[in-house]
Image: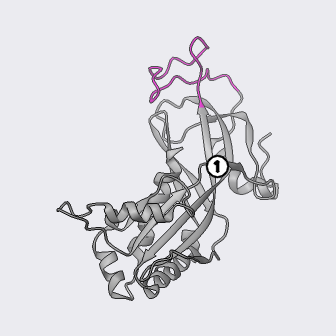
Amino acid sequence: MLELKEAFGRYMGRYYASLTPTTRAMKSFVERGISKSIVWAPDRMIDQVQDMLAAWRKNDNDGGPGSSAHLPVMIVATGKDYSPVLGDFSRQVPEPEWVTLPGDPLSRIFQLRQMQGERRAQIVICAAEDETARSMAAQFTLFIAAVVNRRFDATYRFAGINHQWPVMLEATDVPAMNIDSGQKNLTILAIDLTLKETIPLFSGPKAGEEHDGKGDGSADNPHGYPALKKMVSYDLVQNVHSNVADGTLDVS
């Protein structure tokens, strides 16, 4: 599910844009651009940070001869595992609900299920001196403490329309743990986050099933279900993630 990784990348871009340099190394970090400052790792890499850092240092970041990798650098990863959220936070919507999509000019009817899951994310800060690493970590915890940054949206596309679904941070008071690198002049701090993601599963009539004749049947322009079906407002279903926990919304 690449949607969350793309959304988290944009979220980290917002953090990068918010940074205030407090050391000379941080000034270089914010001036060289996000593509040369924050990089993705294949998966959660607390045990692989040395290999990731070695690969980064071998990388030719400036397009010239020899090694030109810069410090500090932030390495970001998300876990491969998936866990459903606990019932005291929210709940799954396993039974299909009849929905229409805001912005759909054809007013088609589809079905929607909703998954609520947890994804682990990790941010590793590598700097030549501890002052820079601490400042970057401290400013990240300040960034996520802002109410507006306690959640972000992931974009899911269906029926030619982009749909925004929320991702929430489980906690914002997260520590930056020191990782012993065994190297002089290198400080490594690791920050672990738990992301609670809401994932929609849209569906329309399968091949051979009755449909409304709208659309062309392609993935980006599917047919809808016939109109004489039980429907529930898409707007209500889209808000399940925030309302079911306290029992104020019943989608049964």
- Residue at 17% over, 62% down: 64
**Where does the image place residue 206, in percent across and percent down from the top left?**
59, 18
**Residue 110 is drawn in which quadrant?**
top right
Q: Residue at x 32, y 82 (%)?
A: 27
Residue placed under numbered mark 1 in the picture: 81
Residue 63, above or below 27: above
SS class of the residue under badge 1? loop
Residue 42: x percent and y percent? Answer: 48, 52
Task: Point out residue 53 in the picture as x, y percentages from the top left corner.
Answer: 42, 65
Please check the rendered image and state whether residue 211 is part of the magenta-colored stretch, yes or no: yes
**Number of residue marks:** 1
Question: Where does the image place residue 84, in percent across and percent down from the top left?
Answer: 72, 49
- The stretch in magenta equals 203-229
- The residue closer to the viewer here, 35 or 200, is 35
Q: Amino acid at mark 1?
A: Asp
**Residue 216 painted magenta:** yes
Q: Decide: is 8 above or below 198.
A: below
